[in-house]
Amino acid sequence: MEWQQLEYFQTLARIQHVTRAAESLSLSQPALSRSIARLEDTVGVPLFDRQGRTIVLNRYGQLLLKRVNRILKEWEDGKQELQDLTHPEHGEVSIGFLHTLGTSLIPDLIGAFRAQAPQISFSLMQNHSYSLLEHLDAGELDLCLLAEPTETKMKIQWTPLWEEELFAIVPIGHRLADADSILLKELADEAFIFLKKGYALRRTTDRLFDDIGVKPRITFEGEEAATVAGLVAAGLGVSLLPDLRGIDKSKIIYIPIREPQCHRVIGMALIKGTYLSPASQRFKDFVLAHFGRTEKGAASNHE
């Protein structure tokens, strides 16, 4: 078996079309087909099911792809480590974070860090917690900023950083708009606008309402906190959100909730034992120091 066969297999598995995969690899279609055939001969099983002009991984191919991804990731990490040794002050940090953090906190953090290390670049990914953790586990992210991971078998090391208060968000003119604070149960009969299931904030809001025995009437579900706030501003319902900077607040009111305590903890997640480049380690240390945290005694493990 040749090393390139693994790279060809990975590319074909991603594109699932022989002609387009061959073009991506600057190969002829017959050459790619021969390479995949030799790989299948080596492992002793077919790896793809043919469906007309497209092909899809079968269960053997799916199993092998997981191993191949890790093999090639180790190879890329090895090359990166050698480059880091020769250029320790340069590099790229790949971070993932929740959508609700993208309006102010992440830009502020990166801005402050880049003032100290302008030569380091960033690759950013916004998504919900489960997707971020999958990318983290696949080695596509160095670290993530998200709520504490739950119900995962991944070897996650999570360090709490700060507590984020959640507010009742209502449109101007709402019956509760002039209240200094409210009880969460006062919203029981409202129409709600939430993020979709799978988002960390949605899990928090679901738990808060479960705890008080209220089943919220959900009329809209969105993927962006700014969209949720916009729908509230349009008078289509109410919501629970953290204090988001960078969005239009001219038509919404933030009301503190005095009972129960409505908050969530945001922290930093990484895969235990994973290699961090000097640039990523430097940013990680910067974030911990920014929030007055140290790894020792603060991190919790999830697996």
Image (cartoon, helix red, strand yellow):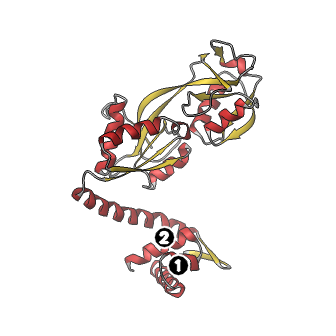
Mark 2 / mark 1, whichever is N-terminal: 2
Give x and y (percent) for residue 152.
Answer: 51, 44
Residue in view at x 67 percent, y 12 percent: 179
Q: CA distance from mark 2 to mark 1?
A: 14 Å
Q: Is residue 57 above or below residue 248?
A: below
Q: To which quarter of the image does residue 221 belong? A: top right
Residue sitting nearer the eye, 48 or 90: 90
Extreme residue in the top direction = 180
The answer to whether residue 133 is above or below residue 203 is below
**Residue type at mark 2?**
Gln
Q: Is residue 175 left or right of residue 36?
A: right
Between label 2 and label 1, give the one nearer the viewer. Answer: 1
Residue denoted by label 2: 10
Task: Give percent across and percent down for residue 82.
Answer: 25, 61
The residue lying at 56 percent from left, 19 percent from top is 261
The residue where tag 1 is placed is 23
Q: Is residue 158 visible?
A: no
| Amino acid beneath label 1 | Glu
Across the whole image, how many numbered discs are drawn on residues?
2
Which residue corresponds to the image point at 40% horizontal and 41% vertical from the top-left? 110
Mark 1 Cα-neighbour bin, 10 Å: few <14, some 14–19, many ≥20: few
Q: Quadrant of residue 158?
A: top left
Element carrying mark 2: helix
Quadrant of the image for the N terminus?
bottom left
**Is residue 96 visible to us here?**
yes
Which quarter of the figure is the C terminus placed in?
Answer: top left
- Residue 204, above or below 143: above
Q: Secondary structure at mark 1?
A: helix
**Residue 96 appears at what percent x and percent y?**
47, 46
Q: Nearer the viewer, residue 94 or 46?
A: 94
